[in-house]
Image (tube, grey):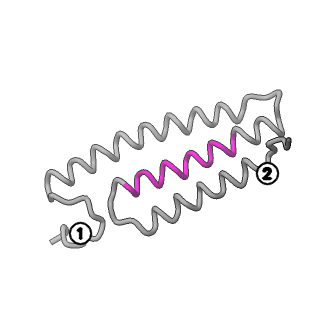
Amino acid sequence: MTEIGLNHFLILSTGLFFLGVYGFLTRRNLITILMSIELMLNSVNINFIAFNKYLWPDQMDGLFFTLFIIATAAAEAAVAIAIIIHLYRRFFSIDVTDAGELRH
C-alpha cells in the first residue's frame, strides 16, 4: 500500500485551484463566480495544512493561517451574498453580462 505524501496533496490543490480559476473566468452567474473563489481559497487551505504536516510538523503556523482564511472567506461570502441579493432585487438579474446594461 502506498502512503499519501505531500505530492498528492499538491496535485489535488493545484487541480482545485485551476478548476476555481476556470469557473471564475468562464461563468457569468455571480453565485458560481463566488463558489469558484471559495474553491480557490479551499485549495490554498489544503496547501497550508499539507505543508504544515509534512514540512513543519511541530509548528502550528499553517493551521492558524487556515483558520484566518476560513474566517475571511465566511465574511467575504456573507458580504458578497448580500450584494448579490441587493442586485437581484433591484435589477432582477445576477448575470455578469447584464452589468454593462445596468449603468444606463
Image point (19%, 53%), residue name: 88
Q: Residue 71 vs residue 29: left or right?
A: right
Residue 52 sits in which quadrant? top right
Image point (50%, 34%), residue name: 71
Image point (73%, 51%), residue name: 10
The relative height of residue 31 versus residue 77 in the rendered view (above or below) is below
Q: Amino acid at mark 2?
A: Asn
Measured from the top left, where is residue 81 in percent x and y? 31, 45
Q: Earlier in the sequence, mark 1 or mark 2?
A: 2
Extent of the magenta region? 32-48
Distance, label 1 to label 2, CA atoms, is: 42 Å
Measured from the top left, where is residue 16 in percent x and y? 59, 54
Q: Closer to the camera: disc 1 or disc 2?
A: 2
Q: Residue 79 vs residue 48: left or right?
A: left
Magenta region, main secondary structure = helix
Magenta-colored stretch includes residue 41: yes
Q: Are marks 1 and 2 in contact (CB under 8 Å)?
A: no
For disc 2, the marked residue is 7
Q: Residue 7 vs residue 87: left or right?
A: right
Q: Amino acid at mark 1?
A: Asp
Q: Residues within 10 Å of mark 2 (few under 14, many from 20)?
A: few
Magenta-colored stretch includes residue 59: no
Q: Residue 61 vs residue 44: left or right?
A: right
For disc 1, the marked residue is 98
Measured from the top left, where is residue 76 in percent x and y? 41, 43
Image point (55%, 52%), residue name: 40
The relative height of residue 55 versus residue 19 in the rendered view (above or below) is above
Measured from the top left, where is residue 101 in percent x and y? 19, 72
